[in-house]
């Protein structure tokens, strides 16, 4: 502050002094010039007066040739005034007299005048008077006066300068110094800070007040600008931090490069992708950071990027590298140019697409597998349909022949027909097992989990294998306690499992052997049923390959029928029902297959069917319509229903014919095939459901298509039952009777 003030005071003091000296010089010079002019004029006036008074006498003295008088007059002229030299010349120009004032020299500044001397007696001049004038005396007098007055004038100048300095200090310097002091104490970011303005005594604010107000306004504007700048800087810092966090959290590697492919920024994911100990530092080269394989050639990352960069163009590429763990890594690169940035020219984004490619490959493999499974399912569906159709004729006619009295009375023929029927059912079970295995492998097996009666299922299963047991001379035995009869499972599949295990126990037993079925409690929440036989048993090697598809463990040489997939299907069904299948076997002694299923509480089980009143069947005439385009299947149906004389069966070979007959006869029941020449059975079901008059008509689908999707489609379209071929005559008749009496199960 003092340096600034001192500098200002010094400058103002010098300025005031210089101004005062200048005024003094101008005013003093003018005054001296005026006095010099007055003195010069006085001297010239005296000289003129002396010349005018002396010219006449001097002419007379010269006319009289009074040289003494001439000399005297000449001397009188140099006594006063400005004349310092007088010369008198004769008519012929000869110098007659010359007089100098005492002290005058030719070095003085002289001015010369010439005056002709005349007398009345002559018309021409009789001589010439030459005088020289000098004003040196006036100059000396002026210089003496200036020297005498100089101290006083200097005092005046000093007094004026000091007075002006004091006035300026009070009016300007002190106020400005105070402004500077306050201004230096202001905080640049305080919008409320102001300087105290100096008092303003005039009616209008002076320049210092205006300056103070401008400083206050500037301070407020500057503080607000500083605050805005700080806020902007904080926002930029927050944004940069946020972007840094975002870039650092990316799973993809990000690398910012300058025009020379020097690193400007790299996120942490890049180091992870390239197995680096730390991120590449800014300013370093990408040379040696990593090696990649492009087009089968191993190159350095810097070489690869140099080949990849194209001015102004975004480039995508895919390279490979071997990770430190030896795994192949596929990287997808996107290199984009950056415009407008000072030190970033390229952005490289690296993505690890190894998992994506593997997923795509797995997806393609899955799609191929699904397509293969679909093709296999379609093939199996077609084969099932094509095999079940002739099997229906074989089994159906065998059942019809078995009920013929002539066959029944002939043991040999009865046994032959029974063999035909058993062979047909065996083929049917093989087809069903193959379809089930296909469903299980494709994950399309559908279950209906609910409480099931194990005692009823066991009774049906034992009845199913009883004829085989009698033929093989094997005894059947069972033990089912009432409190353990309920299990949470799919009843149809449980029966399928039990029939398979019992069939194998009978098939691979010995004459006089025993098959025992026992249902027992296993733990607190499971039911276990054991199928124990006294048959051939299995060694450890056979048990190790027991659940391999189409592996019969060497039993194919025994002549016993089988395909080697029954146990595979059985275990898969039990697993699907949250159960477990265990095997214990000793070669030459027999085997025990134990099945564990979740137990259902007694109150969860359905009401017992024992003692349930059955609707009375009458011999009232019933009209049945069967839509079937295969004549053999139609003949089988006629043969099976021939035992019911009061059932009138009408065969229709197409949907169109069937629709016409239904509208004409209004039958009591419709038997419907699914695949016909002029459409699908579901088309007929849709038409029946759309007609209010025919909607109540019960429909039983009779088809060789045993796929779950076909069964579900038919049931959803309005069918009350679905029977697959080959047909069991007893089941068929029971289903028809149930439908006619509105007693279809489930």
Image: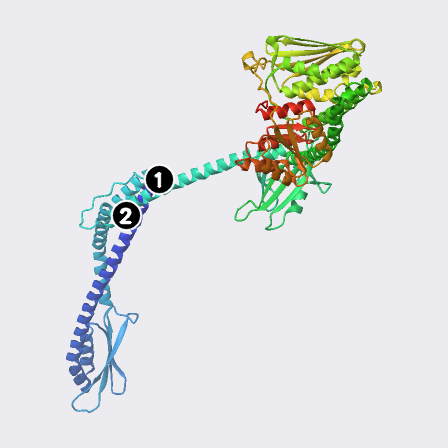
Q: Nearer the viewer, mark 2 or mark 1?
A: 1
Mark before the other along the chain sequence, 2 or 1: 1
Q: Is residue 133 left or right of residue 543?
A: left
Nearer to us in this view, 578 or 73: 578
Nearer to us in this view, 628 or 281: 628
Instruction: Write down the residue under mark 1.
Output: 188
Q: Position of residue 33 (x, y in %)?
A: 22, 65
Nearer to us in this view, 24 or 591: 591
Q: Where on the picture, by quarter, is residue 170?
A: top left
Asked if residue 551 shows in the view, the reply is no
Q: Is residue 465 left or right of residue 681?
A: right
Q: Position of residue 322 (x, y in %)?
A: 70, 34
The quadrant of the image that shows the C terminus is: top right
Asked if residue 593 shows in the view, the reply is yes
The quadrant of the image that shows the N terminus is: top left
Q: Position of residue 451 (x, y in %)?
A: 58, 17
Q: Where 240 sits versus 511, above or below?
A: below
Q: Residues within 10 Å of mark 1 (few under 14, many from 20)?
A: some
Instruction: Write down the residue under mark 2.
Output: 211
Residue at image coords 35%, 42%: 224
Q: Where on the picture, by quarter, is residue 49?
A: bottom left
Which disc is residue 558 wearing?
none
Work out how far the residue at label 2 is from the one at label 1, CA to CA, in angstroms.
18 Å
Residue at image coords 74%, 25%: 400
Residue found farthest to the right = 557
Q: Residues within 10 Å of mark 2 (few under 14, many from 20)?
A: some
Q: Is residue 411 left or right of residue 528?
A: right
Looking at the image, do the residues carrying marks 2 and 1 touch, with CB atoms under 8 Å apart?
Answer: no
Render colour scheme: rainbow
Q: Where 688 sits versus 416, above or below?
A: below
């Amino acid at each position: 502050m003092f340096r600034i003030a001192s500098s200002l005071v010094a400058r103002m003091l010098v300025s005031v002094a210089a101004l005062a000296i200048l005024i003094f010089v101008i005013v003093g010079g003018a005054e001296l010039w005026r006095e010099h002019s007055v003195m010069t004029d006085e001297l010239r006036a005296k000289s003129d007066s002396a010349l005018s008074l002396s010219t006449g006498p001097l002419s007379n003295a010269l006319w009289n040739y009074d040289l003494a008088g001439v000399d005297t007059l000449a001397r009188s002229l140099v006594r006063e005034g400005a004349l310092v030299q007088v010369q008198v010349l004769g008519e012929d120009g000869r110098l007659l007299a010359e007089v100098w004032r005492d002290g005058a020299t030719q070095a003085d500044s002289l001015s010369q005048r010439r005056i002709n001397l005349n007398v009345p007696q002559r018309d021409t001049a009789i001589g010439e008077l030459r005088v020289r004038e000098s004003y040196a005396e006036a100059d000396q007098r002026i210089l003496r006066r200036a020297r005498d007055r100089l101290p006083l004038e200097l005092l005046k100048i000093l007094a004026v300068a000091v007075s002006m300095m004091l006035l300026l200090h009070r009016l300007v310097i002190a106020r400005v110094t105070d402004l500077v002091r306050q201004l230096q104490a202001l905080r640049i970011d305080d919008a409320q800070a102001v300087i105290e303005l100096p008092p303003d005594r005039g009616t209008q604010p002076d320049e210092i007040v205006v300056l103070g107000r401008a400083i206050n306004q500037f301070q407020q504007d500057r503080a607000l600008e500083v605050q805005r700048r700080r806020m902007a800087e904080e926002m930029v810092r927050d944004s940069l931090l946020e972007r840094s966090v975002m870039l650092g959290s990316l799973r993809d590697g990000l690398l910012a490069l300058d025009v020379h492919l020097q690193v400007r920024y790299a996120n942490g994911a890049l180091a992870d992708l390239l197995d680096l100990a730390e991120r590449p530092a800014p300013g370093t080269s990408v040379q040696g950071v990593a090696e990649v394989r492009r087009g089968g050639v191993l190159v350095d990352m810097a070489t690869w990027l140099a080949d990849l960069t194209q001015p102004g163009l975004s480039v995508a590429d895919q390279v490979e590298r071997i990770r430190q763990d030896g795994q192949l890594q596929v990287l997808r690169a996107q290199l984009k140019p950056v415009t407008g940035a000072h030190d970033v020219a390229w952005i490289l984004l690296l993505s690890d697409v190894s998992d994506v490619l593997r997923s795509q490959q797995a997806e393609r493999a899955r799609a191929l597998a699904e397509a293969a499974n679909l093709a296999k399912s379609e093939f199996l569906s077609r084969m099932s349909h094509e095999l079940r159709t002739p099997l229906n004729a074989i089994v159906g006619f065998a059942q019809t022949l078995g009920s013929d009295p002539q066959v029944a009375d002939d043991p040999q023929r009865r046994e032959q027909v029974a063999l035909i029927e058993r062979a047909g059912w065996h083929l049917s079970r093989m087809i069903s097992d193959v379809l089930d295995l296909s469903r299980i492998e494709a994950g399309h097996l559908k279950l209906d989990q609910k409480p099931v009666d194990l005692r009823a299922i066991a009774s049906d299963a034992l009845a199913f294998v009883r004829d085989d047991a009698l033929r093989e001379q094997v005894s059947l035995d069972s033990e089912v306690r009432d409190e353990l009869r309920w299990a949470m499972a799919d009843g149809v599949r449980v029966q399928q499992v039990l029939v398979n295990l019992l069939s194998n126990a009978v098939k691979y037993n010995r004459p006089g052997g025993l098959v025992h079925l026992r249902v027992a409690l296993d733990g607190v929440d499971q039911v276990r049923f054991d199928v124990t036989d006294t048959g051939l048993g299995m060694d450890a090697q056979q048990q190790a390959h027991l659940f391999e598809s189409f592996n019969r463990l060497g039993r194919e040489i025994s002549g016993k029928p089988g395909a080697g997939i029954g146990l595979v299907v059985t275990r898969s069904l039990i697993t699907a029902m949250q159960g477990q299948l265990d095997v214990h076997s000793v070669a030459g002694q027999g085997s025990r297959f134990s099945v564990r299923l979740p137990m259902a509480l007694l109150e969860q089980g359905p009401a017992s069917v024992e003692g349930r009143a059955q609707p009375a069947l009458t011999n009232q005439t019933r009209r049945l319509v069967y839509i079937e385009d295969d004549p053999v299947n139609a003949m089988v149906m006629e043969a099976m229903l021939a035992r019911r004389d009061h059932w009138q069966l009408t065969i229709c070979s197409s949907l169109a014919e069937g629709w016409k007959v239904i509208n004409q006869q209004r039958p009591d029941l419709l038997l419907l095939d699914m695949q016909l020449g002029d459409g699908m059975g579901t088309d007929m079901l849709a038409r029946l459901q759309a007609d209010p008059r025919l909607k109540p008509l019960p429909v039983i689908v009779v088809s060789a298509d045993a796929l779950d999707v076909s069964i579900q489609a038919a049931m959803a379209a309005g069918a009350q039952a679905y029977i697959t071929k080959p047909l069991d005559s007893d089941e068929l008749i029971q289903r028809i009777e149930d439908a006619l009496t509105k007693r279809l199960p489930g």
